[in-house]
Amino acid sequence: MTAGGIITGVIVVGVIVLYISSAGKRRPKLVKENIPANLGVLSHVPIQPLIDQLNTSLEDEYIQQVKQRFLKDFPNRSEDEFEWLLFELKRYFIVANILKKAPMFSEDVDEIWHEMILFTKNYQAFSEKFLGKMLHHTPNTNPEPAPQERAFFDWIFSQLFEITQFSWKTWGSFFKYPMEEGLLKEFKESSTEALIEKYFQRSEENKDVLEFLVNRLKKQLSEAENMYHANPKGSFSKQRTYGDMAPLALGMVFFSYFYFDHYWDYMRAFAFAEAAKYTSGCTTAVFCGSASSDDSGKDSGNCGGDSGGGDGGGSSCSSCSSCGSGCSS
């Protein structure tokens, strides 16, 4: 074989090796047909009335307008990616309906929310039908890490929904931060009614899921105490697949409650290691903004001014996504 042939062969082999090694790191192809049905709600969660309310509150024509504008504003995004991001935004709206204040931890999902707000009349109609009042978006103007807020978000999310590969990529790593010790003590000692009054907003549609969440955390705290007395280091199985990650929440509660200062030293052994390679560069404890139905939480970056029929076409509003320099899409 000639020297030229050898060099060509080496180059070909190098290209193949590079392709194979990078294949596992590439973002999985998004196909909207693979989006889980019914928002990926876990089978035992009593949340169907709230899902139905969300679906009836979002007009198809409104979503199509948002989709067209999003694809125009972000020409590098595909229709399938829009559908996946909308799927995650809908799940976020469920969380925002449940919590008094819900931080937004995904810059990508936040982009869809901003597109929705540009159609001001439609957005107000959606908010009032889904929540009974305006769902405000307050951008985060102080992008400091908020690990305990992220931890509570992770716990709530994992109790309600299956966590897909796209979820992990879009929201960033789950279960990385410990839950606040004071919050766990409150859930252990306070009544269900008092906890719902402090942390949640109750409606006819979500009352069952609120009781489910409070009682679930109370039960996990009791299980954690019993486990600690039997084995101070706990006994957990490593998560090996996407989907139902609710069992990881018990480990999260256990290590948060008994080993708060060394939480990740213990929890990392059980967290879903395979997901790490798909996690974005976003600092996952920094939120981009928050949802609030309280009038005092009105979005200071609200676009407003869409008096011409709500098409958002003439708005000069700039993006108020404030995830900070740690984020990359």
Image: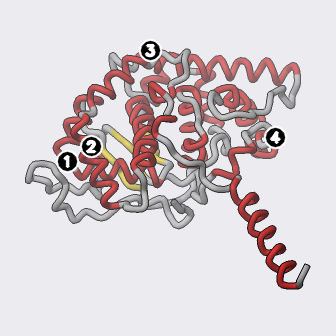
Q: Residue at x 69, y 26 (%)?
A: 247
Q: Can residue 101 be seen in the rendering of this structure?
A: no
Left or right of residue 178, residue 307 in this image: left
Do the residues bearing badges 4 and 2 touch, measured as CB atoms within 8 Å?
no
Mark number for residue 120? 1
- Could you tell which of marks 3 and 4 lies nearer the N-terminus? 3
Do the residues bearing badges 4 and 1 touch, measured as CB atoms within 8 Å?
no
**Residue of label 2:** 64
Could you tell me which secondary element the residue under label 4 belongs to?
loop
Which amino acid is tagged 4? Answer: Ala
State which quadrant residue 254 falls in.
Answer: top right
- Could you tell which of marks 3 and 1 lies nearer the N-terminus? 1
Could you tell me which secondary element the residue under label 1 belongs to?
helix
* Foreground tag (3 vs 4): 4
- Residue 304 coordinates in the image, percent (x, y): 19, 54
Q: Can residue 251 be seen in the rendering of this structure?
A: yes
Which residue sits furthest front? Answer: 1
**Residue of label 4:** 269
Could you tell me which secondary element the residue under label 3 belongs to?
helix
**Residue of label 3:** 208
Which residue sits furthest right? Answer: 1
Could you tell me which secondary element the residue under label 2 belongs to?
helix
- Residue 138 coordinates in the image, percent (x, y): 35, 51
Which amino acid is tagged 2? Answer: Gln
Mark number for residue 183? none
- Measure the alpha-carbon separation of dots 4 and 1: 46 Å
Q: Residue at x 77, y 39 (%)?
A: 267
